[in-house]
Image (cartoon, helix red, strand yellow):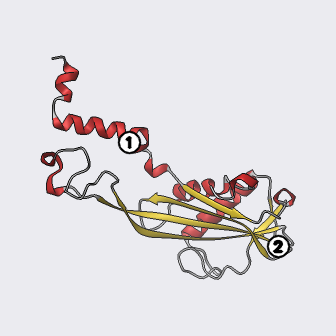
Amino acid sequence: MNRITRFLAHPVALVAASLVLLLGPSGCTTASRVGVTNDFDHAVNFRAFKTWAWYPQQPRDAEGGPAKGYESFLDKRMRASVASEMAAKGLTEVTTAPDIYVAYSARVEDKQQVSPYYNGLGYPYGYGYGYYGRGYSPVTQYKAGTVVIDIIDARRKELAWRGTGQAQVNQNTIDEAETHRIVNGILSTYPPQDNNARR
C-alpha cells in the first residue's frame, strides 16, 4: 500500500480530500465575492451622460445620522469610492446642473447560510457519523453588507439605473476595503448594456 493509498484509508483524510474537491479554490475566496444585480430604463441613452452630482435630498447617511452637518465614516468611504469609480468612467463631478444624480443606501445585516451538504442527521451527505457527530452545525452565521446605488436622470427626475451589491463583511460596519470592493463590483456594470439588465 503506497503512501497515497494509506492516506486515503483514514476517514479524516477522506473528509479533507472531499472538501477540497467540493469547494475547490472558491473555498478560500468566499469573502472576496460580491453578488451584484442591476436594472435600468432601456429608453435612456447612458452614453450621453457626462456630469454627475450627489442627490441633494438624501435624508440620512448610511449609519442613520443626518446627511448634513457631519458625515459618518461609512458615508465618507461610500462617497470616496463612488467618486473614484465615476471618475474612472470619465464622468465629471459638478455642483450645478449635472446630467445625473447619484444616491445610495448601505446596511449590515446578520445572515444565516445552511450547508447544502447537510442531510438532517447531524452530518453532511457522504460523511460518517463518527467524524462530525452531534456537534456538527449545518447553519453558518455571518454578516452581510448590502449597498444600493441609484442613478437618477436629472432632467427627467426619474430613476435611470439601480445597482445592488452584497458581500460578507467582518464587522457591524463596512470598512474601507470592503466598501471599495462592493462599490467597484456594482459600478462595474455601469453603463449598462441591453443584455445585462439583470446580472
If the image is split into quadrants, where does the C terminus sit? bottom right
Horizontal arrangement in the rendering, residue 42 relative to residue 61 (left or right): right
On the image, the x and y values in percent for residue 154 come to: 82, 73
Which residue shows up at 59% across the image and 76% down it? 61
**What label does residue 23 carry, if any?**
1
Classify residue 120 by image quadrant.
Answer: bottom left
Which residue shows up at 54% across the image and 80% down it? 64
Q: Nearer the viewer, residue 32 or 137?
A: 137
How dense is the environment of label 1, judged by Cα within 10 Å: few (below 14), some, or many (20 and up)? few
For marks 2 and 1 on the same chain, the one whose residue lies earlier in the sequence = 1
- Amino acid found under the numbered disc labelled 1: Leu
Helix, strand or loop under label 1: helix
- Amino acid found under the numbered disc labelled 2: Ala
On screen, residue 176 above or below 16: below
On screen, residue 24 above or below 71: above
Pointer 2 residue: 154
Q: Nearer the viewer, residue 2 or 151?
A: 2
On the image, the x and y values in percent for residue 131 come to: 16, 46
Q: Residue furthest left?
A: 130
If the image is split into quadrants, where does the N terminus sit? top left
Q: Are marks 2 and 1 in contact (CB under 8 Å)?
A: no
Q: CA distance from mark 2 to mark 1?
A: 46 Å
